[in-house]
Image (spheres, grey):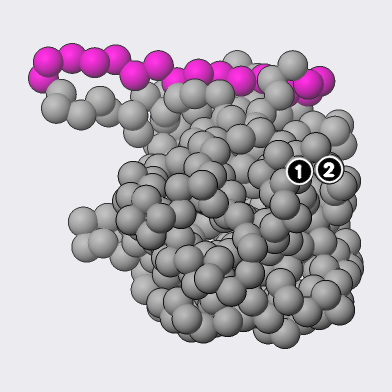
Amino acid sequence: MKIGITCYPTYGGSGIVATELGQGLADRGHDIHFISYALPQRLNAARANIQFHEVAVTTYPLFDHAPYALALAAKMAEVAAGHNLDLLHCHYAIPHSVSAYLARAMLLPRRLRTVTTLHGTDITLVGADRSYLPITRFSIEQSDGVTAVSAYLADATHGMIGADREIEVIPNFVDCAAYAPAELPALRSHFAPGGEKLLIHVSNFRPVKRPVEVVRIFEQVAREIPAKLLMVGDGPERGRAEWAAREAGLERKVHFLGKQDSIGQWIGTSDLLLLPSLTESFGLVALEAMACGVPVVASRVGGLPEVVTDGEEGFLVEPGDIPGMARRALEILTRETLAERMAQNGRRKALERFCAARIIPMYEAHYLKVLESA
């Protein structure tokens, strides 16, 4: 198949999944065309069967904001016609699925199929906003195929957006070879030279990820045991999280590392992942930790219970319960047999249910169903 993929190229779950999906599809012999305003962060554009098409947005004094959705639609139509694409796959509804609808209309009478994958905040935050709700609903209903990364998100789309159509649940996935238990003594000794426990948080540091709460949880953990915290990622809440660490006197124990490549190595060298999010439609980083054999302490919200079983691969705690998360973290960090059992459970579940080799064929089957539909 010849497939166009549009995603946000920034440091976030939807872009990561879209990029990994495209690369996996290319490895399986499909021709993949990424269409976005910048090269997705994890995309290796030099790989066989992959091309990247940059969307150029013209600035003009008349426009207060550059009309990206229109430029994207024009580029989608251009690439689809020039490379004879079979379908466009849009990750994140707004504005990508709207642009795909316009591109499809531009190419009539040729029928270009479109698939939209819903990732979370495109429904629960952006799509639910009254300003965007009607066009979000319209673009979803006009897509030839719609998938969601969790049953929670599929239900939320029906309930919050009122979209009246079938939504297939295809969960997020990981490369189980790249995300695996890791022994990196040099990296570990650099951050924990005294044998301290290593906790990690990975996110785009948006308010919904609660990075300040991560520091507060760690503060309580560090009172009880020798520990260090790795904060991987960047975003609007980083400054507040750094201030919280300084205010608590934790400057030497909390390391803000910014955006990093090879996330699996950073997670795999840690003892515990903290994910106190206010909401998660899936919780990709929790799955990445499980694949690395690292227990998780996360919020009991959204799609996370579909990924982490409380007491099996980690613990789920009510959002905002900082003392509760600290207690659960200490329970794992001070009970070696419990930590080892959770690590093994997490790796096993990732291998059995969430590896790329299992999930990518589900997308291929969805594409075929869309292409064969009347």
Q: Position of residue 271 (x, y in %)?
A: 73, 61
The residue that appears at 75% across and 39% down in the rendered structure is 187
Left or right, 182 with reference to 74: right
Can you say which quadrant of the picture contains the N terminus? Answer: top right
Residue assigned mark 1: 189
- Asked if the stretch drawn in magenta spans residue 53, the answer is yes
Say which element carries label 2. helix
Q: Residues within 10 Å of mark 2 (few under 14, many from 20)?
A: few
Along the viewing direction, whichever of 19 and 58 lies nearer the viewer: 19
Amino acid beneath label 1: Ser
Q: Is residue 317 above or below residue 137?
A: below
Q: Residues within 10 Å of mark 1 (few under 14, many from 20)?
A: few
Question: Mark number for residue 358?
Answer: none
Q: Is residue 179 above or below residue 5?
A: below
Real-space CA distance between mark 1 and mark 2, rounded to the nearest whole angstrom: 6 Å
Disc 1, disc 2: CB below 8 Å? Answer: yes
Q: Which residues are magenta?
A: 47-62
Task: Tell how many labels.
Answer: 2
Left or right, 187 with reference to 283: right
Q: Quadrant of residue 249?
A: bottom left
Amino acid beneath label 2: Pro
Left or right, 236 with reference to 226: left
Residue assigned mark 2: 185
The residue that appears at 70% across and 29% down in the rendered structure is 32
Left or right, 73 with reference to 332: left
